[in-house]
Image (tube, rainbow, N blue to C red):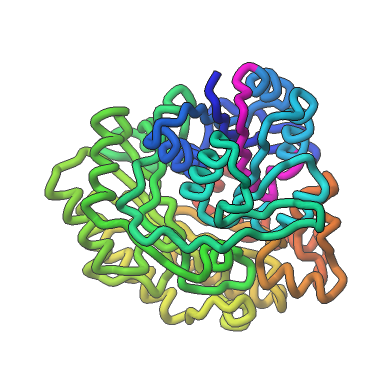
Amino acid sequence: MADILLINPPLYDTSELGKLDCDEHWSPPLGIAYIAATLSHNKFDVKALDLYYTPMDKAKDIIKKELGCIVGISCFSEQRVSAYRIIQYIRSLSRDVLIVVGGPHSNFLYKQMLESFPIDAVVLGEGELTFLELTRAYMCKKPLHEVAGLALKGEMGVYLTKQRGLIADLDSMPFPAYEHFVDTKYASIEWFRELEVGGVKANSLKWTAIVGSRGCAYECSFCSTPYFWQRHWRKRSPQNIVDEIEFLNKVYGYEFIDFSDDIFTLDQKWAIEICKEIIKRDIPISWNCCTRADAVSEELLYWMKRAGCLFTAYGIESFSSKILNAVNKKITRDTILQACEMSSKAGMNIEFLLIVGSPGETDETIEETVQLIDSVKPFAVAPSILTIFPGTKLYQDAVKDNFINDDYWLSELPCPYDTREHSIDVLKEWYDRIKSLDNVEKAQRPDL
């Protein structure tokens, strides 16, 4: 039993599926992995648990056995119900445990979290240094209000401590504590099995994720990333990133890396340097990334392909100029086509990340996106229905329209689709229309 327990809660699905149980995860929880590494580096005894696909009853049993004097819980909006239940459970076990919550959901709804649940603090924004200082203060019996970057509750209500700046030198941070997750199987997304690396199906490769940069320089209306990261984009050095890749390959035998950056190629020169460093060291690794259509070039894609990039996911959302403008994507149809042409020339597999149901969506705008897919024929298509999350402009607009308010998040309802303009049946029809064009979906369902 460690002094500090960090938890990635289960994904509690309130749809018809009930609870989701799965033997394979998409990727380790890098947020708590970085915090665990920072605490360990400073000689604190810490245990990190990834319970994302763990049934609640089993999760509680594990937590009870591992409970320390400080518990940190990561909370995304889709995990909030299980996080609430875990908080209540831990408090029922002990009134003395310090319960700290972090992550996007609690970052934007810290007041609600502190007022509604028996927690002691919310970490705002980047968690490594704040959690470290909080731990030092608590262990030395010093007041938490002296720690920057927290939301706390006192006699006069909820208040914020001094704002903490972003970490200036990301290279100074230790690599994530992957050792806490070596017994958890992380696997690729389902369609990935169709790709091959040296004659081996890609989804059979040992898989993990890293982040080379933090933040985003754009402000799409559906995304909270720019607000969470204070509208700053920062990057690690290519050498530091490839050091981590080499470490993961040699020490843990990872064969495939998912770059989980919001926009991996925002700085193209930097991305090329990473590719060249991978090639220079001759690391037997394959990888993928996500980026924007206006953040690639022929030179960049050439080096990405040489360095083992198996596919690139383009977050284009739609091929309708009307919709692109509505979500503040700041990209044009021509730019999307140019990125597709350059990717094809480089021999790069591409995936389209799409959203249906944006403000102003119609059958005609959906058809524009369908025509793009038919023309380009990307390897994979990943549509989603527009979902409203705290911390986004979309959420602010929905609140103004009295479509939703903060009390919604205290319910057990799933994260809401935006049905202000169209019914859920229409949104699902559009989703199915796009998904039917996915090459992998076609391979699995010959009737499409």
Kindly tell me whether residue 350 is visible in this rendering.
no
Q: Residue 116's x, y, as percent?
A: 82, 47
Question: Which residue lies at the image location 67% right of the left edge and 55% below the top edge?
Answer: 151
Residue 367 shows in this picture: yes
Q: In the displayed structure, does residue 374 sit left or right of residue 98?
A: left
Please identify the quarter of the rendering in which residue 208 is found: top left
In the depicted structure, whether residue 150 falls above or below residue 135 = below
Residue 75 within the magenta-colored segment of the rendering: yes
- Report the quarter where the N terminus lies: top right
Q: Is residue 310 above or below residue 370?
A: above
Query: Quick one: which residue is furthest to the left in this view?
Result: 280
Residue 350, x across and y down, in percent: 40, 58
Q: Position of residue 338 (x, y in %)?
A: 36, 76
Q: Residue at image x 81%, y 70%? A: 399
State the residue at coordinates (41%, 78%).
Answer: 335
| Position of residue 149 in the picture relative to residue 168 (left or right) | right
Residue 418, above or below 5: below
The magenta segment: 65-81
Q: Is residue 133 above or below residue 289?
A: above
Does the magenta segment cover residue 22? Answer: no
The residue that appears at 76% across and 23% down in the rendered structure is 93
Image position, residue 58 (x, y; %): 68, 20
Which one is in front, 291 or 385? Answer: 291
Q: Is residue 203 left or right of residue 440?
A: left
Asked where in the image residue 302 lies, by quadrant, the reply is bottom left
